[in-house]
Amino acid sequence: MLWIGNGKVLTMDGELCYDLGYVGVRGGKIDYVGEECGAQEGDTVLDAHGGWILPGLVEAHCHIGIQEDKKGAEGDDCNEGTNPVTPWLRAIDGINPMDPAFHCAIKAGITSVMVGPGSANVVGGQFVFMKTHGRTMEDMIVKFPAAMKVAFGENPKTLYGGDNAMPATRMAIAGMLRQELSRAVRYRKEKEAGGEDFAEDFALEPWLPVLSGEIPLKAHAHRADDILTAIRIAREFGVSMTLDHCTEGHLIAEEIRESGFPVICGPHLANRNKLEIQNSDFKTPGILAKKGILTAIMTDHPVSMIQYLPICAAYAVKNGMDEAEALRAITANAAKICGAEERVGRLKKGLDADVAVFDGNPMFVQTETLYTIIGGQIVYDWQKDD
């Protein structure tokens, strides 16, 4: 059995924390969280040296492995920019688990990530929720499919409009998405009525878990009008959705709250290189969270480097977000929004033994990661690893 202790334990499970506590791990799962160390002969004990013990951090929106470090176009499989509607594409077929950015994530205490296609297409394909440690995708997958990527605004409009193709306007983006969702609804009805002899359509099958509510639309939307269009369409078809980026969300916070859709906010640690992100500000996640909106914070790696996820949370605190809520935005909230709250994001008996140990508050820039544990395995040790 593995024990991690002699530090401040922040479980992210409600308000529960221990000023001096221990986490016990058995068989890849959390077996104990509390104030006592039950280590027996033969157990391994990791000393936190008075630091902070948290659940492994969770990145709720990024492109790690699918847009690789240091490889240019050869390592960029993020966008299939030849067809604006590609729901059948699977992130798991484009991610390279040996992208060095995974080690950067592990060294930062990030143990889980939501990864998928970029925002060039109206419909980009299927996201995966995965661990950051492993040699193959099969080793790393937690949930697949985990979401269906859709995009509004400047990216699909400029990519295809620039080639004199659809969509060249926001009207066309919304119309193409409605058309595709309508096709999917008809397909579901036909399949339900078709019986055993029904011939499945590979291009439409990926929509079924969206229509059934098993997975959400993952909507790239920066501008306020694009956010409201995404909400409008999701309501029309009765599907769940996460609002990703939500750059101008602070301008329509009440409307977002009324929609009931959660937000994955960011990346604010990046330049304002597009017109639709001119109002980007670290104040947005705090404003949304104070409205009672379930909010996570993202890096959108490689737009912002994934290892700066806790620093993004820190800047949100500096700009008005509650500190405890900012920590939840990169742990429990992120896991819940990604549909993985029963696996990761909290220190609770029965959940995956994903633990990050820091020598202090991870949102302080000078804080060092001491240990990263994924599935009960020590994958980063400050005394041994570079």
Image: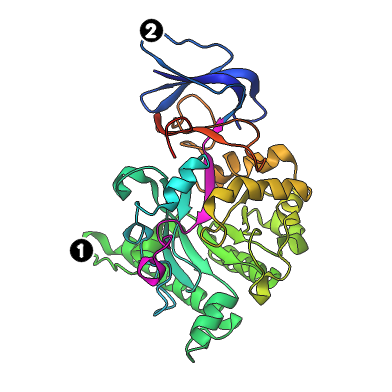
Q: Position of residue 177 (x, y in %)?
A: 50, 74
- Choose between 127 and 112: the one closer to the eye: 112
| Residue at the farthest top position | 41
Q: Secondary structure at mark 1?
A: helix
The image quadrant where one finds the N terminus is: top left
Residue where numbered disc 2 is placed:
41
Residue where numbered disc 1 is placed:
197
Q: Position of residue 238 (x, y in %)?
A: 54, 60
The image quadrant where one finds the C terminus is: top left
Q: Which amino acid is tagged 2?
A: Glu
Q: Is residue 55 magenta?
A: yes
Q: Is residue 104 magenta?
A: no
Q: Residues within 10 Å of mark 2 (few under 14, many from 20)?
A: few
Q: Residues within 10 Å of mark 1 (few under 14, many from 20)?
A: few
Q: Which amino acid is tagged 1?
A: Asp
- Choose between 327 and 239: the one closer to the eye: 327
Q: Nearer the viewer, mark 1 or mark 2?
A: 2
- Residue 340 showing in the rendered view: no
Residue stretch in magenta: 54-75
Q: How is the image coloured?
A: rainbow
